[in-house]
Amino acid sequence: MNVLMICQNFYPEIGSAANRMKNIFKRMEQQGSEVHVLTSEPLYPTAELYTDAMFWDEPSLDAAKITRIQPRDLRATTNLWRRLRLFIEQFVLAVQEVRHDTKQYAYIYATTPSIFMGLVGVVAKHLKKAPLILDVRDLWPESLVGVGITKSRLLLAPLYWLEKWMYRQADQIVINSEGFRSYIEKKGIAPEKIHYIPNSIEENEWLIKRRKVSEQVRVVYTGNIGLAQDVFLLLDVAEQLKEDKHIEFHVVGYGYHKEKFEAHVLERGLTNIHFMNAMPRWDALKQLAKSDIAFATLVESTAFDTVTPGKIIDYMAMGCAIVGAVSGHAAKVIEDAGAGFVSRERSREKIVEHIRYLAEHPEERSAMGQSGVKYVQAHFDWEQNQERLFEAIRQTDLRVLGVSK
């Protein structure tokens, strides 16, 4: 059967959003579906990154049926109106593609954020007369408030209305964090329509081997250096640990604040922080496997208490002990896994204390790393979690036929 997938991020882009949609695409295809993808040109974090052939590392996906839209300006910005202009342009271009597409689909699988790509899914549902599965990876516009872009009621009121309407238009809703469930239910969505499918680890990624313990302790941060991450906290931590010569920090990062972060490192003479450029997922996982401790952070906001960052799952899968400056659901996952320490208050002193303790206690560090691996194997493995995806699809089919579960 034909399936239309609508998403802002897809292969070969780096980051958990593109990786999630790539994995869902693969599992749909393995089940015999012919999936057509409507997405953007690879532009996250920059378009220039994808001129390097190393990111185009999956030939089967290069040959997939992918339609890519290309808005005029996709530069990272905190300017609210430029962002809205970008999202609206993406919406218009994507709707045009749907209108010109003559194929019929068994169902539509659309993802948000941004909310406008989810709304393309709603339009596609009605144009194609096909049921809609909505994959919610972030609560938008809630996250706009969380990163401080806007608190304008004039702007947020219609966006919240659109969000609620979009959820109600969906035949089934998929969430990647259990923290989203109660929020969406409060929008009037029946619990049985919500399916939890977390970001997970692929079978071949378990083959990556960890390095042996050495005297030099490596602390790593991977991923976005953006508006939602309080990565500048790491500067203060590294500065307090400058005299601990056996502890070094490695940042595999990209994003809006990357250049500012690097400038601060140079200004403060933090020679214990080392940078690596953005790299394909497989290489980033190998960097984690070489590391002892992994740092996770989100800005302090109730908007992010519902989120489970994909990097936390990757950290645990690669056996790193975690030190987290997080709260809410992210903190709960780390603690439930027994995979590390958490400072909900984002206390620099506590974080320094946790890193120093783990550096000086390799056996406990290793035990936390192994606890994280076991937790991911039990809860965040694609081979297991794909069944939840197939159940959401089955329920969509039953809903179309008018059959109750």
Image (tube, helix red, strand yellow):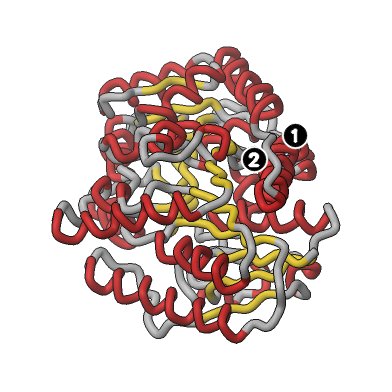
10 Å crowding of disc 1: few (<14), some (14-19), many (20+):
few
Residue to which mark 1 is pinned: 384
The disc placed on residue 213 is: none
| Nearest to the observer: residue 187 or residue 141 | 187
Residue type at numbered disc 1: Gln
Mark 2 or 1, closer to the camera: 1
Report crowding for label 2: few under 14, some 14 to 19, many 20 or more residues within 10 A (C-alpha).
many
- Taking the spot 47% from the left edge, 50% from the top edge, the residue there is 223
Report whether residue 296 is seen. Answer: no
Q: Is residue 111 above or below residue 249?
A: below
On screen, residue 127 above or below 158: below
Residue 256 point in image, percent of width and height: 34, 61
Residue most extreme to the front: 402
User: Given contact means CB atoms under 8 Å apart, are the residues at marks 2 and 1 in contact?
Assistant: yes
Residue 146, position in %: x, y? 26, 45
Determine the residue positioned at 70% across, 68% down: 105
Left or right: residue 141 compared with residue 322: left
| Viewer-closest of 266 and 373 | 373
Q: Which mark is residue 200?
A: 2
